[in-house]
Image (cartoon, helix red, strand yellow):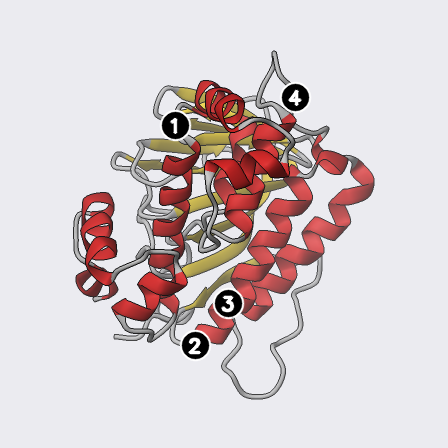
Amino acid sequence: MTVTSENMPDSAADHGESPPPELLIAGRYAQLPGYAVHRAQGARSWLLLWTEGGAGRIRQGAAEVRTEEGELVALAPGVRQDYRVAPDADCWHFWWVHCRARPAWEAWLRPHARGDGCFAVGPVPTAARPRIGAELRRLHADARWTGEGAPPLPVAAHRRAAPAVAASLPRAHELAMNGVERVLLLTTSSGYSGGAPEAGGGADSRVRRVEALIAADPAAPHTVASLAEAVRLSPSRLAHLFTEQTGRTPMRALREARLQHAARLLETTALDVGHVAAASGFASPFHFSRAFRTRFGVPPRQYRG
């Protein structure tokens, strides 16, 4: 059965259900005390929660955060999660988006980690919040696009937005995903969220720059030497600093970014495995297939389904 907003439950989240991981589904809720969601196994995809009013309380594994107006919380899949209207709040108005993550997101969110796949961003300055709300309304509209004519108009800022699903049309999915990325860029940028701390309180700016270079083009022929040159460090110094601050070597980070990029191509294109391997920076389809199976537990063709 094709999944659409008409045959999804009013909220996949209301009853603790989690949408299929291949879908992008978004909505805006205005909930009162008593609203609560519990997922013992976590969600099957990433969940983003942007608070526009009131307050919510979110638990993910051992991490617990309170989220208020102008704050974004991102929750990784596969970890027990509970969220509800905060006990001392009279409401919680929030946007929620279920989707798969893209490789670049890891670098954007890492400075905001709270543990167990929970990332809390903000508060975003008041002047920036209308733009983020507009982006969420636009991605919600793009997710409802049928492919005929222009996408529908966004819902009004004060309206409840029932779940919208980008499922059967790849272009609608891509439009909506682009909106998700704009929201993440706006909330995690140094201009809006206060920036990531420098060495001593977080990642060194040169390490963040290398992560950004890898995320921007994982298929490029990066080497430790070329990355070190880009940030004016010696290869040995970069390798030491990067490993110390991220827990993995630059080449391991590059391999992960390439595999995540390949997974996205398998999800959203009809390219054969050989072309996916080449487009993701792997020298041979055999090496790619072996690495992909080690990372995701299934070979590329089976992952695509």
* SS class, disc 2: loop
Q: Earlier in the sequence, mark 1 or mark 2?
A: 2
Q: Are marks 3 and 1 in contact (CB under 8 Å)?
A: no
3D distance between C-alphas at marks 1 and 2: 37 Å
Q: Are marks 2 and 4 in contact (CB under 8 Å)?
A: no
3D distance between C-alphas at marks 2 and 4: 40 Å
* SS class, disc 3: helix
* SS class, disc 4: loop
Q: Are marks 2 and 3 in contact (CB under 8 Å)?
A: no
Label 3 sits on residue: 174
Residue mark closest to the camera, 2 vs 3: 3
Label 1 sits on residue: 248
Amino acid under disc 1:
Arg
Q: Is residue 268 above or below residue 128?
A: below
Name the residue nearer the viewer: 66 or 208: 208
Packing grade of label 4 (10 A; few <14, some 14-19, many >=20) is: some
Amino acid under disc 3:
Glu
At x 51% / y 29%, what residue is drawn? 235
Amino acid under disc 2:
Leu
Q: Is residue 278 above or below residue 131?
A: below
Name the residue nearer the viewer: 21 or 157: 21
Which x, y percent locates residue 51?
61, 39
At x 46% / y 33%, what residue is drawn? 84
Which x, y percent locates residue 163?
48, 61
* SS class, disc 1: loop
Mark yes or no: residue 102 visible.
Answer: yes
Q: Is residue 246 above or below residue 225?
A: above
Give the label on residue 169, or none.
2
Name the residue nearer the viewer: 92 or 164: 164
Residue mark closest to the camera, 3 vs 1: 1
Q: Quadrant of residue 34?
A: top left
Residue mark closest to the camera, 4 vs 3: 4
